Image (cartoon, grey):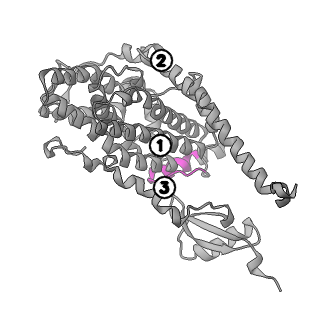
Amino acid sequence: MGEEFSLEHRFQAYIDAENKIEPKDWMPENYRKTIVRQMSQHAHSEVVGMLPEANWITRAPSLRSKLILLAKVQDEGGHGLYLYSAAETLGVSREQMIDDLLQGKAKYSSIFNYPTLNWADMGAIGWLVDGAAIANQVMLCRTSYGPYARAMVRICKEESFHQRQGYEIMMHMAAGTPEQKAMAQDALNRWWWPALMMFGPADAASPNTAQSMAWKIKRKTNDELRQEFVDKTVPQATFIGLTVPDSHLKWNEVTGHYDFGPIDWEEFTQVVKGNGPCNKERLAARNKAHQEGQWVRDAATAFAKKQQARAAAPVSATNPSAA
Amino acid sequence: MTQPDTWPLWEVFVRSKNGLAHKHSGSLHAPDAETALKSARDVYTRRSEGISIWVLPSSSIVASSPDEKEPLFAPSDDKPYRHPTFYDIPDEVGHM
């Protein structure tokens, strides 16, 4: 007990001095658990996040936009890989994490349980959803767990294109025909509030925040990140002539921030609980893709075994003329 | 007399400080992993270059062939849309 106390003390002092924790370093069991949970949920979000956009690859309005969307979805798959690998440095197995996701035991970002109804949603997702993710991920580049921070640096470098391509879509649609502009506005209306919910519960309702901040896993609270996102995004909407769907939204001269209206936390809770518009569909799609990919994994394993057997076999055995 | 050259070759990776990834420093010959680690410490961290070392048998590294450079890496040259600079975002919008 005494030793544990002093170890935790040293751990905290080490973190307070802005040092990174690496896989073989001693860490409190709860730090390990928190990091594993956060990294695996983050990885799941990248993987499930491919689904709403993949829905539109075959219906992209031009070859250019199709190539871009393909490249973006491909990036998200890669981001999932970096994060699963970072989680594996703490001894959890990839199979276990994926199994938890497929069985519906693991969480992923609530935003991906909303449907993508039309092409404007591809713009709104890139601009708002990736924008919100970037705010969170830029902070996580300085998280205290080394492998997580390094994965984040790599991801952030790649994310910038995601947000810019989304905003470009919105910009073009907002400057297009009245119908196109209406579509862009409709997409903003539908994605704005779910995007704000991506940052998680309000600080007052988030019991884990204090510990995560003390361990420097998080560097900013949910509310701080949310405010940052609002301040940055509102002028971007105004610039292309779209209106943020919040009647309470107002610039506050005193605080130097935008005030915004109350978030419907009941909706958030329902989506997290599995009752969002697409929870079942997403999980079913993930399971279907996993099952339908089984033969590829089997074939790759069989091929590798065959190659090994061939390499190990004596020369005469592989030479038909010797038989 | 021993024949050091019959000892396997090991690749040495050094982490200079926590938070940074291990980086390739060089290689050395050693009869086993434990000795390789000790030798790596003596050879590659004499001037406080590191705080953590990885060694692994050079034979376990699978490398791409220089002959395949073109087919492997050229395809990404014609995909400028993977870069943020491909998109024209007006300066007024701010950093994105």
* Residue A60 lies in quadrant: top left
Q: Which residue is mark 2?
A: A281
Give coordinates of residue B25: x percent, y percent: 55, 70
Give coordinates of residue A257: x percent, y percent: 19, 33
| Chain to which the residue tagged by mark 1 belongs | A
From the viewer's side, name the closer residue of B59 and A12: B59
**Which residues, given as a range, are shown in magenta?**
A8-23
Q: Which residue is mark 1?
A: A78
* Residue A205 lies in quadrant: top left
B18, above or below A194, in the image: below
Q: Are marks 3 and 1 on the same chain?
A: no
- Residue A13 shown in magenta: yes
Q: Which residue is mark 3?
A: B19
Of the residues shown, which amino acid type is indicated by label 2? Glu
Image point (56%, 44%), residue name? A85
From the viewer's side, name the closer residue of A232 and A78: A78
